[in-house]
Image: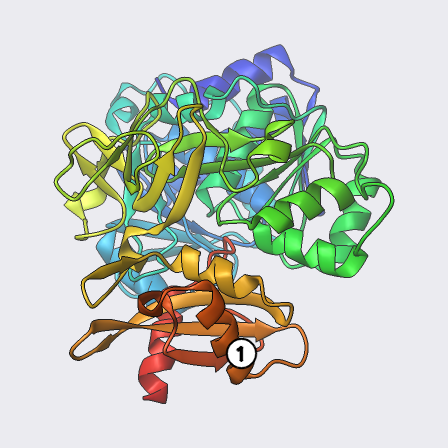
């Protein structure tokens, strides 16, 4: 199958129903498929052929979505790239993932690939092409739908290969998902979870309203009201910003939302509790990865009783906790998470793997996380395998240290990393964003009261903010680089 055929079917069923809304482009399902067909024919004239890998690096999510469908119509593979990626990084990605072209909205010189400009004149460029969908090309069936780039918080991104059938399963995987008539999406489609929620909503007949990606909390709140959104997808950093601006309230700010989805990075129990009380009572935290698709969800009454988890493992997911030798551990024991599901990826591009982090082994997807699962099926995350700190032979999970430090009233945010030091092997550093007057001495005393000696940070650094990638995840690689530069 090919996902382009799915959209041809949606256009046949709902030709006049709104599909996507954005400041620059509003299309019904029928218009969406027609524009994708015109774009496909123009891209074909520019040399895009079945089996090609095509990068998309533009700011407009609505046009990105059209181009993805156009690429599928041609039997090519879409590789969405964060529009903030600089030219040098684009050239590296083009080489590593064999991109024949990168579609971009700003003119620039390029090395090793063909830049195709998608600017304000694109509509005029494609209007001369027939709008009949391309959907009978037998050559296109072998090409994957996506090469999804991982967030790269610990180094170069990996390329996760997702076939059309498995991508479709990701979109319809969790039947409990609800979107209502309109999903508001302020996140880039280069982010895997954002892409999944967008297509999940559209396959259920919802319109997706794309909010400009750079925005203030007030602008997002205004947009939710103005668009009469019934669901919103977010990341924890957006939740934090909304809570800071709107603070404590007697009623949730977004009382009419059917769902406020949050994913992509950890949330503290306190943040979940505040988000449910002050933003939306229908908060849904999801956990998954580019490699596996969705794994678990926390919502409803489970938010009140299992705040320290990422929810119940979804029914179609087989999840195990294993040790370093892949021996399955008992309920409640801490180890590496591995999953099997119908929606997991087929491969990593060009067998691009690392000793830790995302891996595919013997039919299992390893998302690179450490956790524990209880007898009720609730999953608790303790950190990334690549973030594990080994100090004097003791395994230290950064999340445990971060949780203890976060209890200090003067700490707004904290991130813990390991750094090399002889003879311990690794030592512990804590980067702290203070919320008021805060001294290192008070943090040392606080940690002494809450952490054993082998888990206490030996270095504290006060910062105004923690470095994050586009999906809101803390970049521990940048924190370590800051340590290296500081000496």
Residue 202 vs residue 169: left or right?
right
Residue beneath label 1, please? 463
Foreground residue, 56 or 268? Answer: 268
Looking at the image, is 418 positioned above or below residue 103? below
Residue lying at the far bottom of the rendered structure: 487
Foreground residue, 59 or 471? Answer: 471
Which class describes the residues within 10 Å of circle 1: few (<14), some (14-19), or many (20+)?
few
Residue lying at the far top of the rendered structure: 13
Is residue 347 something that shows in the picture? yes
- The quadrant the C terminus occupies is bottom left
- The quadrant the N terminus occupies is top left
Looking at the image, is 72 positioned above or below residue 408? above
Residue 457 vs residue 84: left or right?
left
Residue 384 vs residue 426: left or right?
right
| Displayed quadrant of residue 332 | top left
Residue positioned 77% across, 60% down in the render: 245
């Amino acid at each position: 199958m090919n996902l382009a055929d799915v959209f041809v079917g949606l256009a046949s069923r709902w030709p006049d129903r709104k599909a996507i809304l954005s400041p620059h482009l509003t299309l019904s399902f029928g218009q969406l498929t027609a524009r994708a067909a015109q774009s496909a024919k123009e891209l074909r004239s520019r040399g895009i052929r079945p089996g090609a890998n095509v990068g998309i690096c533009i700011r407009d999510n609505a046009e990105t979505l059209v181009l993805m469908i156009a690429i599928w119509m041609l039997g090519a593979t879409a590789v969405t790239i964060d529009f903030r990626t600089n030219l040098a990084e684009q050239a590296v990605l083009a080489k590593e993932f064999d991109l024949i072209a990168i579609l971009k909205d700003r003119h620039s010189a390029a090395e090793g690939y063909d830049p195709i400009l998608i600017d304000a004149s694109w509509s005029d460029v494609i209007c001369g092409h027939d709008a009949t969908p391309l959907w009978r090309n037998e050559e296109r069936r072998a090409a994957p739908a996506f090469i999804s780039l991982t967030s790269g918080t610990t180094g170069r991104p990996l390329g996760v290969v997702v076939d059309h059938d498995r991508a479709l399963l990701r979109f319809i995987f969790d039947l409990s998902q609800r979107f209502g008539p309109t999903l508001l999406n302020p996140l880039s489609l280069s982010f895997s979870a954002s892409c999944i929620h967008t297509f999940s909503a559209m396959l259920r007949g919802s319109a997706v309203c794309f909010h400009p990606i750079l925005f203030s909390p007030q602008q997002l709140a205004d947009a939710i009201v103005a668009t009469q959104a019934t669901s919103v997808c977010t990341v924890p950093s957006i939740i934090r910003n909304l809570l800071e601006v709107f603070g404590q309230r007697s009623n949730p700010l977004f009382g009419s939302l059917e769902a406020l989805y949050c994913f992509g990075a950890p949330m503290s129990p306190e943040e979940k509790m505040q988000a449910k009380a002050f933003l939306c009572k229908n908060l849904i935290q999801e956990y998954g990865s580019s490699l596996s698709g969705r794994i678990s969800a926390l919502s409803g009454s489970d938010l009140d009783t299992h705040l320290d988890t990422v929810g119940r493992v979804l029914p179609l997911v087989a999840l195990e906790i294993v040790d370093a030798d892949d021996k399955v551990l008992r309920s409640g024991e801490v180890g590496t998470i591995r999953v099997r599901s119908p929606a997991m990826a087929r491969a990593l591009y060009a067998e691009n793997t690392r000793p830790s982090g995302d891996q595919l082994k013997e039919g299992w997807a390893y998302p690179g996380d450490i956790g524990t699962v209880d007898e009720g099926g609730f999953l608790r995350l303790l950190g990334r395998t690549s973030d594990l700190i080994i100090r004097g032979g003791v395994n230290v999970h950064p999340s445990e240290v971060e949780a203890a430090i976060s209890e200090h009233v003067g700490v707004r945010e904290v991130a813990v990393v390991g750094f090399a030091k002889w003879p311990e092997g690794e030592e512990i550093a804590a980067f702290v964003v203070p919320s008021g007057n805060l001294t290192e001495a008070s943090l040392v005393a606080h940690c002494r009261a809450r952490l054993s000696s082998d888990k206490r940070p030996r270095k504290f650094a006060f910062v105004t903010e923690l470095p994050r990638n586009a999906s809101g995840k803390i970049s521990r690689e940048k924190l370590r680089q800051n340590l290296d530069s500081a000496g």
